[in-house]
Amino acid sequence: MTMPKGPQAFPRTEYLRRLNTVKSEMARREIEVLVVTAPANITYLSGYTSKSGYVPQGLVVSLDDEEPTFITRRMDGPAAIHQMFINRSHVIGYPETLIANPNRDGYDAIIDFILDKGRTRGIGLEAKLLPASTVEKFKYRSMKAKIVDFTHVVAWIRGVKSDLEIGLMREAAAISDAGMLRAREVIRPGMREADLAAEIIGTLVRGADGKPGTDVASFFLCSTPRTSTCHIRWTEDVFQLGSQINLEFSGVRHGYTSPLMRTMSIGSPSDQITRLHEGEVAGLEAALAAATTGRTCSDVAAAFNSTLKKCGFEKESRCGYAVGIDWTEPTASLKEGDITILKPNMTFHLMLGNWIDEDVGYVISETFRVTDVGGEPFTKLPRELFEV
């Protein structure tokens, strides 16, 4: 029995639209063939979400071919056939002899494919995301070709979402809401951090509104006495009366995320945390109001920072970043000085985690899209400091 084609997150026309936009940029840069290696960009252009990027693989986009060709480890070929919109003949699995081989690897298989097709003019690479030795290999083995750095170009293209993508991010947001509501329901003194994590992650997988989560994204649970940390997971500790819990996670729908952060307190929070919460919410609302078409990332950050400062606090880190597939996009930041112009359907995680000292930290966030009248949040959860 052959591997069947799985349900597609988007219609074929959507993938071809994205590819045509990339090809236009390739032609402008005199690139005949592009090798896409960033996993999120492969997802964007093909629908592939399997976790095979720990070994060499590449989506080869040619100006002359409607569909790209995916070259991956042979054992991962069936997943590509199942998940990608492309014809099965465009999935090529290279042999196991190229794994853990000091002389030849999967990138040699990609180069062989390109050279066999006679694509020897301009070759685009996401060069800054590849080992230097791999870039040198492309240059040495393709001496007749001009090697062009295409790093982050696809990421910038996917920064403006289609309405279909916005729909998936809304579904992911509903799952994020469900996970946070489940946390509020079950947190209690005597509960292990690990058990809370299991409850939330189970909810993120089960999903919401009949839509299951399709992956588990990064998950952070930072509780007393670790509320000043930002990127750790659960521990072996047990919650106590007076514990504060800072949560950050996201539902996932076919690679798309809508991250969410909230702070919860078992019992009454401290006056400092309460005041910080009030200031952050005021800043959040000011930032959303500033996130209108035609303004800049810097404008959004300035609106937040100035409002928070009036409330007696400051935030050292940026207040957000572009978000979509696999969480963070390596492009625009919501920070003062970033003059990226906001366009409709650009999406950001307005990330207002504030870690003030070794014993003081607080989090709240919204994932939103840019519109002509301001940032439109995807999640529906109240902007509360939850007392449980």
Image (cartoon, rainbow, N blue to C red):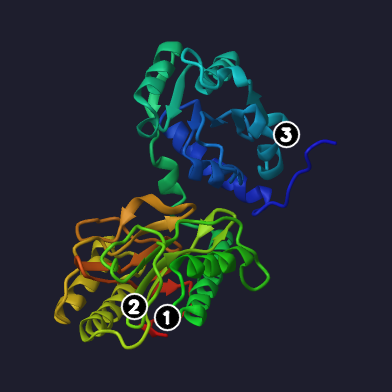
Which residue is denoted by mark 1 in the rendering?
189
How many marks the image carries: the answer is 3
Q: Nearer the viewer, mark 1 or mark 2?
A: 1
Mark 2: few, some, or many residues within 10 Å (few <14, many ≥20)?
Answer: some
Mark linked to residue 20: none
Q: Which mark is residue 88?
A: 3
Between 228 and 322, the residue placed more toward the observer is 228
Q: List the single residue furthest toward the right.
A: 1
**Label 1 crowd (10 A; few <14 / some 14-19 / many >=20):** some
Question: Percent position (x, y) of residue 15?
Answer: 61, 46
Residue 48 vertical position relative to residue 305 in the rendered view, above or below: above
Instruction: Tell me the distance, in whole angstroms, between the alpha carbons under discs 3 and 1.
Output: 54 Å
SS at mark 2 in the image: loop
Mark 3 nearby-residue class (10 Å; few <14, some 14–19, many ≥20): some
Look at 58% across and 19% down and name the residue there.
113
Name the amino acid, label 2.
Ser
Task: Say if 24 sits above or below 120 in the image.
Answer: below
Please tell me whether mark 1 sits on a helix, a strand or a loop: loop
Q: Amino acid at mark 3?
A: Arg
**Image vertical order of residue 219 relative to residue 110, above or below:** below
- Image coordinates of residue 83 in percent, x first then y, are 67, 44
Tell me residue 82's x, y (percent): 71, 42
Instruction: Give me the disc on residue 243.
Output: 2
Quarter of the view holding residue 267? bottom left
The alpha-carbon separation of the residues under discs 1 and 2 comes to 8 Å
